[in-house]
Amino acid sequence: MKIKNFLIGSIVVTGTGYLLYSRLLSDDAKAEVKKMAHSVSRCYTRISELVESMTGQQIDDPGVLPNVQVTKKQWEQLGY
């Protein structure tokens, strides 16, 4: 029942949006809407690539990192 109501609501909202876009907007307004949609799409793509590049890194040997070496030296100085 919830899915049916969601689908009907989605179809009504989409149809209303399309009619408003095609009948009521001027050519300049349509161009601005298209420009905005492309801008949002580009931003989404750039953010997706940034997140994927940040989470997709894997370091084979973390012992070569400077912070790991400093931490090991500190532990050795403490007697561990």
Image: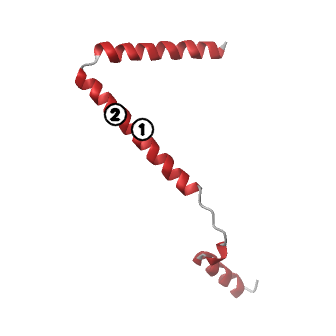
Q: Nearer the viewer, residue 71 or 14?
A: 14
Q: Nearer the viewer, residue 45 or 79?
A: 45
On residue 36, which mark appears? Answer: 2
Task: Tell me what residue is drawn at x 53 percent, y 51 percent.
Answer: 51
Q: Mark 2: give few (<14), some (14-19) or many (20+) Cα within 10 Å.
A: few
Q: Residue 53: x percent and y percent?
A: 53, 55
Q: Is residue 56 above or below residue 74?
A: above
Tag 1: amino acid: Ser
Q: Quadrant of the C terminus?
A: bottom right
Which picture quadrant has residue 78? Answer: bottom right
Which picture quadrant has residue 17? Answer: top left
Q: Mark 1: give few (<14), some (14-19) or many (20+) Cα within 10 Å.
A: few
Which picture quadrant has residue 6? Answer: top right
Residue 4 shown left or right of residue 28 in the figure: right
**SS at badge 2:** helix
Q: Residue 29: x percent and y percent?
A: 26, 24
Q: Quadrant of the N terminus?
A: top right
Task: Tell me what residue is drawn at x 68 percent, y 81 percent.
Answer: 72
**SS at badge 1:** helix
Q: Is residue 63 above or below residue 35?
A: below
On residue 41, which mark appears? Answer: 1
Q: Mark 2–mark 1 contact, CB under 8 Å?
A: no
Task: Tell me what residue is drawn at x 33 percent, y 16 percent.
Answer: 22
